[in-house]
Amino acid sequence: MPATFAASIAASLRSALANTPFAAEIPPGFTAQVDATQNRQFGDYQSNAAMILAKALKKNPREVAAAIVGAFAAEGLCEKPEIAGPGFINFRLTTSALTTRFGALLADEARLGVALTDTPKTIVLDFSAPNVAKPMHVGHIRSTILGDGLGRIAKFLGHRVISDNHIGDWGTQFGMILWGWKHLLDEAALEADPIPELLRVYREVNARTKEDESILEACKSELVALQGGDAGNLAIWERCVELSKSGLQKIYDLLEVSFDHWYGESYYNDRLAPLVDDLLASGIAEVSEGAVCVFFRDDEKLADKPAIIRKSDGGFLYATTDLATIDFRIQELGADAIWYVVGAPQQLHFEQIFTIAKRRGQDADFRHIAFGSILGKDRKMLKTRSGDTVQLADVLAESIERARAIIEEKNPELPEEEKAAIARVIGIGSVKYAELSQFRMTDYIFDWDTMLSLKGNTAPYLINAYVRTRAIFRKLGSGFGSSSGELVLTEEAEKELLLKLAQYAEIVPTILEDFRPNALAAYLYEVATTYHQFWEACPVLKVEGDIRHTRLALCELTGRVLRHGLGLLGIGTTERM
Ligand code: ARG
């Protein structure tokens, strides 16, 4: 597959710059930006290179632009560039360049023009990571959806992605769980559906400890016994972790999210003491008031925020486990990059452990991929009507039910089984898309009506656009494979759609730059609206010959891009809805 339009134009622009009279004066680090235009009225791509250079060289921007245009040679790729406004250079692709690309994209069903990265990495992706027997809160929902989407994109770009569900299976909550298990557990309820029962027990104990000091003490002793290796408590703990995992697995199955590993915090227990010794021996950590701490005295941001890695009572902390986890991931999993998809409130924690890791000489690409909150319609943290944390399982069930009602209304004659399957795809897809179509740091409002709407930037709208690309072939009675002819782009609406589809290859590789799957979502939405305009302007089945073939090819390619792009977001499509 040849380079993208943006890359080809940028390359020609570089050669043109080298052939201008001021070539020798161009600052060494200068790179000419080429961006897609929002409006084809100003050409297909645009560069502000002349304006930036003019500033650096103290020249007139329009004159710099004229010199660049004079030296520009892009055989067959674009028309002679135009200079606009204060010195923008506008590029318009030739019809033949568009047509050639069209053929190449049609022939490239697997990658749709998207190149593999030339710097493949082994990335450990740490996401979801709920805590056993504690409510999986909205933060875990965001992490799960975002992490899964980013993992799919990284894999598609050619990285080796190792996903690890770092579940909290060894926290202080086990004191309460153990006490609750012994005094309040309803075995039958646990068998039927473990997560809600464990949650009920946890909440109940939590409430009781607040009223009764002695219960709090009893919980603490249960925890001490567990940590000391008490066989009975260990057995309960193990069963509790297993039950929780199987409950979580059901949710992940529904979401079609999977993990390569579930090491979990407890996996690192034996590594914590030697790690702390090692940090003390190397002088990175020191004893302070009986605890072991790492100070960041020369770090402006962290100067007054030491990290505790062993409490004065000998207990280890969240940070200690994370440091041991980094060792394991680098040494045993061969990670070049470790990416954590965890809410913004943990920013300090990650700054601390990344700084410690770097001091230890660990130079992986550490990233905290933070995100904001999900709000209710009242703009406060999302809660259930009774004030509890919203459970992911309940959100998914309700979304599927609501999607089902929409399909029932739209297409009542579909077979029951198909309706159920479609409802699942739309229901799950809507929850995922509501998350992924927002910039991750934005606090977004969770609103059923908006996210399940058939209009606007939503999953149902995009899936419906895909369904429409398929409907034409159903009407025709045969797939695109049986159509043949030449590709001839005649109408503006066709060219515009083709250009949009070709830009898939430009968008996808940028998503990981700042971890913005929302840019992919925004792009897919533009594909759908551009397709809609094409559809209004260009009849397909009423025309014949090469024109019909070309338009069918546009429908086919649009369908492929929508399905593939939604797939990268972890969202399925259906053939009807
Ligand atoms: N279990 C943690 C929580 O619920 C998230 C863990 C994230 N991953 C990590 N390596 N710290 O807050």
Image: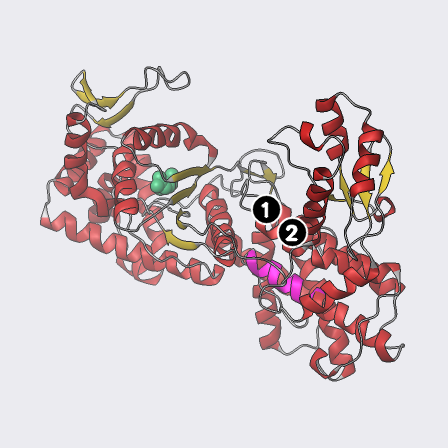
Please identify the quarter of the rendering in which residue 99 is found: bottom right
Q: Secondary structure under badge 2?
A: helix
Residue at position x 40%, y 61% in the image: 250
Q: Which residue position holds label 1?
A: 510
Which SS type dominates the magenta stretch?
Answer: helix
Disc 1 marks which amino acid? Thr
**Numbered marks: total:** 2
Q: Nearer the viewer, residue 238 or 412?
A: 238
Name the quarter showing ligand 1: top left
Q: In the displayed structure, would residue 34 be above or below residue 561? A: above
Position in image of residue 274 (x %, y %): 14, 36
Segment tinted magenta in the rendering: 558-568
Disc 2 marks which amino acid? Glu
> Do the CB atoms of the residues marked 1 and 2 lie less than 8 Å apart?
yes
Circle 2 Cα neighbour tier, 10 Å, few/some/many (<14 / 14–19 / ≥20): many
Cα distance in 3D space between marks 1 and 2: 7 Å
Position in image of residue 159 (x %, y %): 45, 54
Q: Is residue 92 magenta?
A: no
- The N terminus: image quadrant: bottom right
Please identify the quarter of the rendering in which residue 446 is found: top right
Q: Nearer the viewer, residue 76 or 122?
A: 76
Circle 1 Cα neighbour tier, 10 Å, few/some/many (<14 / 14–19 / ≥20): some
Residue at position x 29%, y 57% in the image: 243
Q: Is residue 522 visible?
A: yes
Q: Nearer the viewer, residue 531 or 418?
A: 531
Q: Which residue position holds label 2?
A: 506
